[in-house]
Every structure is written in structure tokens, then in C-alpha cells.
Image (spheres, rainbow, N blue to C red):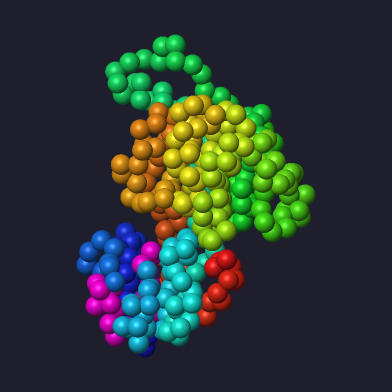
Amino acid sequence: MTRVAVTIPYFDFFPEIKAELVALYPDAKFPASRARMNEDELIAYLKGYEAAVIGLDRFTDKVCSALPELKVVSLCSAGVDHIDPAILNKHGVKMWWAAGINKVSVAELALCYMIFTLRRVHFFSSILYRGEWKGPVGFGADLRGKTVGIHGLGYIGKELVKLLQPHGVKILACDRVDISEFCATHGVESVSFDELLARSDVLTIHLSRNSTTIGMYTAAVLAKMKRGAVLINVARGSMVDENALKERLENGHISGAAFDVFDVEPATGNPLLDVPNFFASPHIGATTRESWAMMLRSGVHGVAHAYRQEVGVYPFD
């Protein structure tokens, strides 16, 4: 019987899924704390176990070297940018991950933030919380009639297209892979990156974080955005130059932005949080009961279905 250790606390919120895991692996171990483990804590916790069901734990060379019995790492997370496949392969560790498992939750959040930002809900709400009423403070804008640009037409981007279609918007999309068939079927215009920047009233990022996307939205790129556009990022941090974004929010070139992800998380103290036309949330894209139930069940499934990952091949590209 495979010995399984779980490193994330979320099974406690889903006792029925925890019971499913225990039925398959009766000796499964669950963490006593909700704090993420450092390298030494992870090594001590996983000693003697053959499989780990994890969230965002980092399996460094030090960790894997100290755990020769470990053969499987099964991810419950939506992303894999915290995992190095070369290290896993070096130590003979297989991995499981399910792509697009939280696509509905993240796409719904992106749509929510588009409307939220265009309507300036955060700004108007702050007025009320100060004990004031709206007064002569300007207007928001409707989503209907806008051009929405989607950068990255993967699982989440495609789901977002479906959610946007009833809203009367023009949808543009840009991706490094061929998206022509999906675009033709769903009434989306496939455009270059420069055209996406120049034409989008709302630009929403749905890219994986990897060597090709980290730092992609530089000051020069943000300067190419349509004046008055809004920027949404519920994907991953480190893709947008946050200092440059702050400058463009303050000078009005970008009229508003809503981010769920940041260069450094937790993002407490981030200077963007002081900008009135910027809205932030603490990485809640997948924080729905529906998404977490699917991710936890995927983690359980992966213990028996993990496979060797290829360096440079999706999702590690």
C-alpha cells in the first residue's frame, strides 16, 4: 500500500473528499498546521512516504535528495510554476497535475473584475465608507459595446470567451499557438500582441508564468495600451512591471486595473494598494468550493496516475 502524506490543510474543509482519500490510502497523514512548510519541515514531514499530495510546496534538490522513498508528487494547485521537472526527473519522482481544473472560477472572477473596474465600484464604495455620498465624482462605464482583449487563449481564456458572448462585446485574442479554429467558431478576432494592446478597452491576462512571460508587460508595453483602457490580471504575478503600472494608473493612461496576483505574495505593503483606481484581492482566483473540490479530488487521483514530466514541454515551457 502506497504511503501518502498530504501537505495542504484544505482537506479539512471537505471531509467527504478526505474520507475518499483515506478509503484508498488508510495510513494517509494530514498536516496539523495550516502554515506552509519550509525545506527542513517538508523533509521531516515526508520522511518515509512514497507519495505527497501538495499545494504550492517547492520540491528543491535538497528536499528530493533527502527523501529517497518519495516517488510521486500529486498537485492540487492550478499552476505548476513552483515545480522544476528537471529536479523531479533527477530523483525519479513522477508528478500529476490537471490543466484547466479551475477555469470556471478564474474566468468568472475575470469577468467580475472587468465590470467592477469599468464601473469604478472600488472608488465609489470608498466614498460611502468615508461617510460621504457620491457627489460630482464622475462616471463609470458599461462593459457592453467595449472591445475586450484576451491575452492567452488556453483553458481559462476560452471559458472567458463563452462568458463574455452574451455581453455584447467585441472579443480579440492573442496567443503564441494557433487559435484560428477556436476564434472562427466563437466569433473571436485573432490579433497580434501589438494590435491587442492598441485596440483593447479591457485587456485581461490569462498566461502561464514561465520564462517567456515573466516581465512581459514592461513600461514600454504598457505605454502601447489604448489610452483609458483597463487591465485585469487574475493569472500570475511577475508578468507586469508593477512600478510602471502604478505610474500609468496615476497619470490616467490606464484608467483602472484589478489584480488578484502580484510579484511578491503576500502583497501587503505593495505601493499599488495606495492607488485609488487600482483594486486588489489576495490570490482568490480558485477560492471557490467548486474549484477546490475538483482540485483536491484531482490530487487524490494523481497518486496512482502520476507520470514523468518533460522539461520544456507544456506546462513547463
- Left or right? Give the position of 155 relative to 75: right
- In the rendered image, the vertical position of residue 312 relative to residue 92, given as above or below: above
Q: Would you identify the image quadrant in which residue 148 lies?
A: top right
Residue drawn at x 55%, y 74% as measured from the top left: 311
Residue drawn at x 57%, y 28% as measured from the top left: 228
Number of numbered discs on residues: 0
- Left or right? Give the position of 290 relative to 41: right
Q: Camera-side residue: 107 or 230?
A: 230
Q: Position of residue 86 (x, y in %)?
A: 49, 77
- In the rendered image, the vertical position of residue 229 relative to residue 180, given as above or below: above
Residue drawn at x 42%, y 48% as measured from the top left: 262
Spot the residue most to the top: 136
Q: Is residue 301 visible?
A: no
Q: Camera-side residue: 65 or 150?
A: 65
Q: Which residues are magenta?
A: 40-57
Q: Camera-side residue: 116 or 275?
A: 275
Residue drawn at x 66%, y 36% as measured from the top left: 198
